[in-house]
Image: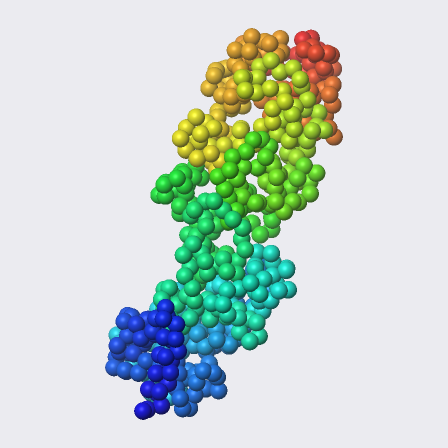
Amino acid sequence: MKPLIVLFVMLMLASTANAQQQSIVNSPHNLSASGPGAVRASSEQEICIFCHTPHNAAPVQPLWNRNAPASNYRVYSSNALQAVPGQPTGSSKLCLSCHDGTIALGSVLSRSQPISMAGGITTLAPGASNLGTDLSDDHPISFKYDSALAQKNLKLKDPALLPLDIRLDAQRELQCTSCHNVHDNQFGKFLVKDNSHSQLCNSCHNNGVTTIVSHSECSSCHQQHSAPSGPFLLKQAKVSDTCLSCHNSSVAGAGDIASDMNRFSKHDTASPVNLVDPFPNNVGCSDCHAPHTMTSTVASAPIIPGRFGKINGVNAAGAPVVTAQYEYEVCFKCHAEKSAVQPTISRQIVQNNLRLSFSPTAVSFHPVEASGRNTNVPSLRPGLSTASIIYCNDCHNSDTGRKAGGAGPDGVHGSSNKPLLVARYDTLDNTPESETAYALCYKCHDRNSILANQSFSRHKEHVVDDHATCSTCHDSHGISSAQGTMMNNSHLINFDNTVVQRDPISQKMEYLSTGAGHGQCYLSCHGVAHSPKQY
C-alpha cells in the first residue's frame, strides 16, 4: 500500500472513531477533483496531499506539506480583550497557509509543480475563507488563555471550565483549532461543536443573560471573520448599523427605531467620531444599552428598565458605576460633567450639568432623582402627586411611541419635537397658548388648572393674554444650589434672557418669593417694566 494511501486511511480511521464525526471526504476541505466544493483540483485525486505528506514534509507536525505563510500579520487589538495576541503561531499558522491568500492552494512541498485547480483558481476568494494578512477584523488567536486572563476579563470563563471539544494548544494558547476541527464538518464551518443558541461562543464567553431571544444568538449581530466593524466583530460597520438592521420594521417585535433615528431631533449615530473630543455629539446604541443583558422587565421611576441591560453609568454624586441602578445614571454619562449637548434656551443662570440641576439639594428641580420640593402643586394630573418621581424618558422620547400615545417603540432615539421631546413644547416668544403648543407640559399639568390660576394667580394672563411661553420663566430641568436661591429660583424660575431683560429702573432681573403663592418680579418683558410687579 502506498505511504500516502496509508496516511489517508489513518486519518479516515481517526475521523470515524467517533460515530458522530463526518469524514473530510464530503467536506469543502476535500480539494481533490472529487471534492464537493466549488474550490477543487482539476485532476488531482489525492485528498490529504493538500496539507500532509509522508515524505519531504516541512519540519512541522503533522507531516506538513506546505510552506510557512506570511510572518507579518496585522493582529487583533482591543482594549476589551486584556490580552495581547502575537503573530499567529502553531496550528493557526498552518491554517493561514491556505486562508491568508498568500500561498497558492495547489502549492505543496511534495510536488515540483503546483497542483492545478479547476477554473484557474489559485487562492481562496476574499471573504470569510480568505482572511488576508489583516487579522484585526477576525476573532483573536494565538494568545494565552489562562486563569489569570479570565480574572482580568470577567467576560471570559476560566479555561479550566472549557468543554472537552474546545482545546488550547500545548502553550495554553487559543488557536483556530480551538473552534474549528479541520477534518470534521458535521456542524458546518468545521466547528468543533454545535453553535445553535451560541453554545460554542458561550463556552468561552461570559456576557451575561438576556431574555431577548435574538440577542441570545451571537450570530445575529457578530461575524467572527472579516467583520466590517473591525475588532467589534459586528456584521455592520458600526454598532448602530448592526442594531438597526433588525430594528427597522423588518423583524417582528423589534420596533422601527430606524425611522426614529431619521427624525428632526435625534441621538446622532451617523456622524464620524471626533477623536479630539472623547464625548462628541454622536453616540452608539451600546452607550445606552448592553445588548447581552437586556430583558423585557418593566420598572418604575427611577429604577432602570430591563431594556437598558446591565449598562454602566454615572451616579448622582458624579462617580462612575459599573452597572447603573437608575435610568438617569445612564443619561448622566453624557449630560452631566461631560456636557455633550448645549442648552437650547439662553438662560439667566446657565447650567449644562443636569446632575446638578436634578440633585435633591438643588433649589428647584423636576423630580428625576427624588420627589420635588414643592408640596403644593394643584395642577398635577390624576396618577401624579408631589411624591412622584419621573423618568428622563417621560419627557424625552419618541413622538410616535407608546408614551406619546402612538404604536411605535419608546426610547430617546428620535422625535419630530426638538430637543428629542415626546410631545410639542413651543419656546418661541409670542406663541399663542393651546393644548398642542404646550402638550409636553400638559402631559403632567392639567391645562384647566393652569388657566384657572390655581398654581399662580397670573398664569392665564401670561400664557393666554401676553403669549409668554412656559419656557420664558421656567427652566424645565432645575436650578442647582450653587447658582440659585429659594428666594429667587423656586418653582423652576430661571428666565429666558432673550425675552426677559433687566428692569430699567432697578437694573434687576429677578423673581423674589414673598410667601406661599406670592412674589414680585424686577424685570422688563414685552416692553413692560416690572419695577417690581407684585403677585
Residue 255 visible within the image: yes
Quarter of the rendering occupied by the N terminus: bottom left
- In percent of width and height, residue 426 lies at 51, 23
Residue 387, quarter of the rendered image: top right
Task: Give the percent coordinates (x, y) of residue 138.
Answer: 47, 63
Say which residue appears at 61% left-offset and 45% top-offset: 323
Residue 494 visible? The answer is: no
Q: Position of residue 99 (x, y in %)?
A: 41, 72
Q: Nearer the viewer, residue 33 or 271?
A: 33
Q: How was this image coloured?
A: rainbow
Query: In the depicted view, which residue is nearer to us: 169 or 471?
Result: 169
Q: From the viewer's perspective, is residue 378 above or below residue 175?
A: above
Q: Quadrant of residue 441?
A: top right
**Residue 531 placement (x, y as % from top left):** 70, 11
Depicted 138 relative to depicted 219: above or below: below
Closer to the camera, 446 or 430?
Answer: 446
At 26% from the left and 78% from the top, the residue drawn is: 33
- Residue lying at 25% horizontally and 82% vertically, measured from the top left: 43
Left of 531 or right of it: where is 218? left
